[in-house]
Structure formats: C-alpha cells, structure tokens
Amino acid sequence: MTEDLRGTGGAVVDLEDFIVEEIPAYLPSGEGEHTMALVRKQGLTTVEAARRIGRTLGLPSRPWGTRG
C-alpha cells in the first residue's frame, strides 16, 4: 500500500469473497433530516460510488458519503 509500511500478508483471491459491512454507531430513529441507505457496490471505489449516487440525486457526494 505504501513504501513506508510493511504489508500484513494475505491476498484477495476472489472479489466475491471480499465483503465489508459497515456497522452504524446507532440505529436510525426514523426522525430528523437524515436518510439511511444500504448500498451494495462492486468494481467501484467508495468515492466513485458516492460521486455517482450524488450526481444522480443532484447532491454533492462529500457531505453525505465520504471524506474523499
């Protein structure tokens, strides 16, 4: 990943086996101005997925999905 850090070993053999599940800090209450969505993506970075969703919804991706 970087020249300054050693790798930890291992390899992703099949992308179908690589799954990340984000666990929210708290459950949605159903009130307020926020919306929660489950997004499944494949072959896209998180930043690119947020950018595409934001573009489709007419929203900037940065405030609602990523730090990138």
Image (cartoon, rainbow, N blue to C red):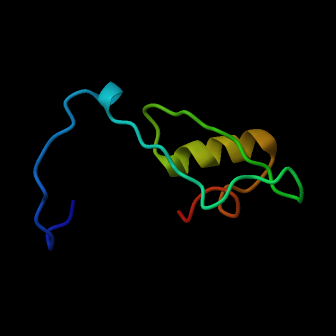
Residue 18 position by quadrant = top left
Question: In the picture, which quadrant includes the N terminus?
Answer: bottom left
Q: Is residue 4 above or below residue 59?
A: below
Question: Relative to 24, is 28 on the left or the right?
Answer: right
Q: Position of residue 39 (x, y in %)?
A: 61, 37
Left or right, 55 with respect to 11, comes to right
Residue 24 place in picture, x, y as percent: 60, 55
Name the one closer to the observer, 7 or 2: 7
Which of these two is toward me, 21 or 15?
21
Total labels drawn: 0
Query: Considering only vertical position in the picture, is 27 above or below 20?
Result: below
Spot occupied by residue 57 in the image (x, y as percentages of width and height) = 79, 42
Q: Quadrant of residue 66?
A: bottom right
Q: Residue at x 75, y 52 (%)?
A: 28
Q: Taking 50 as reference, is 19 left or right?
A: left
Is residue 66 or residue 9 the one in the foreground? 9
Write the residue at 13% across / 57% down: 8
Residue at 21 percent of width and 36 percent of height: 12
Instruction: Tell me residue 2's x, y (percent).
Output: 20, 65
Kindly identify the residue that appears in the image at 19 percent across and 30 percent down.
Answer: 13
